[in-house]
């Protein structure tokens, strides 16, 4: 068991079983031993690799997407660019570089990075130190005032937000809790009392079916939509996930590019769950804005011109062309575990705003 696992077991010993959401929050963000708090998990040497780390084209196209939506909305004054969970700062670096093509947007930006991890914040500070625009950091989106048009991007952020799990049992929907036995081994158990407030569309679940409640993600999407409805702007949420929830569970642990048991190494493996995009779209509508998509990442990037961008970057060099083509395939193809269809993009814009590029 990891040091954090032992502390979680002690906590459960003292106060009783905890929810999966509480377990996720501790495992990912405990200031002393949490997964994100203590390390940079990204890249070939890390635990997983993300689209901006695969290709500079990803951040460049998203930078131009943000600038284009701003332009199409009549160039509202004093735009704020926000990235949720910027990782190594790679997407932002590439986006800001591409935005030099639209200086009118770039020159008046205030850029805010929403990052809870001190370790990753240090990486971001280094990577972005010469980017030429004012940057500031906050720990949560909720601490930002709703006082400017908001241009927001979140790649592989919503999948890290805590979820709760409910399991269909004879006595109704019961919450799956994390328990600890006498020697501190963590396990799962169902709450003795059935839960209320499970959505009616889950009624058809078979025994043992799972409902994952992403209340944190839905609440955040609603808040973002609220700001966009009031001030203008656009949000682009890219993640792996689905449009219609099934009855299976998607919570997973990953360490060194391999799946691991969710409870096996708290603080030392990444925990994430597939994103429920229809839930986010509903939340955006409740917040008073319009949601577009989700569309598949492959279609989205092709629509934004990733193939043409690869050709231009290659400058006629065959070796370079092969490298860039491999990146395009990894980001846009759907077979062999590639990202094109599993990953999806959802946009949030004000009601009545033009259709955002790629949707
Ligand atoms: N967007 C980056 C990194 C994805 S990893 C990329 O695509 O490469 C998830 C990122 O979100 C990390 O930077 C992590 O520290 C941050 N993060 C996760 N949960 C968070 C939370 N609740 N609040 C703020 N940041 C969070």
Image: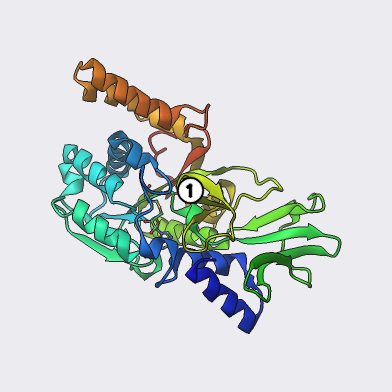
Which corner quadrant of the image does residue 212 belong to? bottom right
Residue 122 percent coordinates (x, y):
25, 61
In the rendered view, does 221 fall on the left or right side of 163? Answer: left
- Per the image, the residue denoted by label 1 is 290
Question: Quadrant location of the N terminus?
Answer: bottom right
Frontmost residue, 244 versus 253? 253
For image coordinates 49% across by 39% down, the residue present is: 343
Split into quadrants, the picture shows ligand 1 in the one at bottom left
Q: How is the image coloured?
A: rainbow
Residue 194 vertical placement versus 160 (above, below): below
- Image quarter (top left, top right, bottom left or bottom right) of the C terminus: top left
Number of numbered markers: 1
Left/right of residue 330 with respect to residue 178 in the rendered view: left
Q: Residue at x 28, y 46 (%)?
A: 90
Across and down, in percent, residue 193 comes to: 78, 72
Q: Residue at x 39, y 38 (%)?
A: 356
Q: Is mark 1 within 8 Å of ligand 1?
A: no
- Judge whether residue 18 can be spotted in this image: yes
| Residue 124 percent location from the top left of the image | 25, 56
State the SS at label 1: strand
Q: Residue furthest front?
A: 183
């Amino acid at each position: 068991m990891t040091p954090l696992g032992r502390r979680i077991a002690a906590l459960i010993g003292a106060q009783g079983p905890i929810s999966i959401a509480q377990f996720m929050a501790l495992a990912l963000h405990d200031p002393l031993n949490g997964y994100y708090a203590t390390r940079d998990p990204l890249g070939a040497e890390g635990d997983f690799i993300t689209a901006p780390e695969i290709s500079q084209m990803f951040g460049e196209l998203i930078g131009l997407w943000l600038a284009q939506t701003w332009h199409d909305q009549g160039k509202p004054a004093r735009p704020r660019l926000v990235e949720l969970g910027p990782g190594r700062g790679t997407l932002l670096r590439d986006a800001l570089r591409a935005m030099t093509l639209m200086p009118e947007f770039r020159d008046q930006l205030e850029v805010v990075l929403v990052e809870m991890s001190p370790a990753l914040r240090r990486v971001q500070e280094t990577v972005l130190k010469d980017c030429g625009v004012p940057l500031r950091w906050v720990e949560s989106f909720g601490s930002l005032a709703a006082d400017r048009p908001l241009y927001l991007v979140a790649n592989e952020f919503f999948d890290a937000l805590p979820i709760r799990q409910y399991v269909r049992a004879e006595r109704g929907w019961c919450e799956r809790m994390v328990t600890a036995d006498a020697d501190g081994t963590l396990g799962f158990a169902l709450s003795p009392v059935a839960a209320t407030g499970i959505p009616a569309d889950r009624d058809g679940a078979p025994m043992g079916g799972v409902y994952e409640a992403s209340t944190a993600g839905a609440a955040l999407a609603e808040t973002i939509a609220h700001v966009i409805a009031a001030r203008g702007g656009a949000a682009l949420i890219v993640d792996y996930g689905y449009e219609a929830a099934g009855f299976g569970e998607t919570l997973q642990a990953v360490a060194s590019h391999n799946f691991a048991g969710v409870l096996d190494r708290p603080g030392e493996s990444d925990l994430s769950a597939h994103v429920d995009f229809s839930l986010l779209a509903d939340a955006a509508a409740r917040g008073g804005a319009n949601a577009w998509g989700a569309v598949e990442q492959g279609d989205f990037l092709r629509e934004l011109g990733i193939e043409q961008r690869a050709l231009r970057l290659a400058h006629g060099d065959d070796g370079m062309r092969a490298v860039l083509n491999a990146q395009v395939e990894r980001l846009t193809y759907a077979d062999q575990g590639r990202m094109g269809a599993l990953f999806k993009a959802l946009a949030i814009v004000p009601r009545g705003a033009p259709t955002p590029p790629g949707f």
